[in-house]
Image (tube, rainbow, N blue to C red):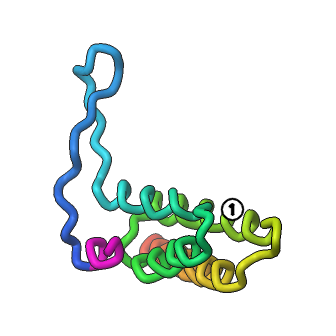
Amino acid sequence: MVEVVLVNSVCAPAKKRPVGPDSTTELRTPPRRELVEIALSLRADRVANVRLNVGRVLSSVISTLHDSELTLVTKALTEQVHDETSRIGGPDRDVIYFANRAISRAQARGDEASLASHDDSNK
């Protein structure tokens, strides 16, 4: 479901939420960021199929994410791989596979972006 929402750009505009004691200052969190954070919150679920779907879903939406979201996803999934490999009872290889696939896609996308900005600066 998350991937359908993100890939098809059906996210509603960012919601305002109060910040501070006087509630006059507001912070906007883009819905895409909220969906990424929700997906990442499931990376330590006790059910292996839930954990592997985090990497699978995020891998399929990498192309829709902004740089800051790519950084967040890469860091969180790297932690997931580390946690999974040290899991009591042994790691789930599918969880590690999908997390690594998402990390690889995020890094490849980051490499493409840095090459494009490097080419633009040389013109």
Position of the C terminus, as image quadrant, is bottom left
Q: Is residue 105 left or right of residue 97?
A: left
Within-10-Å neighbours for mark 1: few <14, some 14–19, many 20+: some
Residue marked by disc 1: 79
Q: Position of residue 113 (x, y in %)?
A: 47, 75
Q: Position of residue 88 (x, y in %)?
A: 82, 66
Above or below 62: residue 45: above
Q: Nearer the viewer, residue 39 or 26?
A: 39
Q: Main secondary structure of the magenta part?
A: helix
Q: Is residue 5 covered in magenta?
A: yes
For badge 1, the amino acid type reads: Glu
Q: Is residue 93 left or right of residue 70?
A: right
Report if residue 115 is visible in the image. no
Magenta part of the chain = 1-7
Report if residue 11 is visible in the image. yes
Position of the N terminus, as image quadrant, is bottom left
Q: Nearer the viewer, residue 32 or 119?
A: 32
Residue lying at 51% horizontally and 72% vertically, measured from the top left? 54
Q: Is residue 113 left or right of residue 11?
A: right
Above or below 56: residue 67: above
Residue lying at 73% horizontally and 69% vertically, measured from the top left? 84
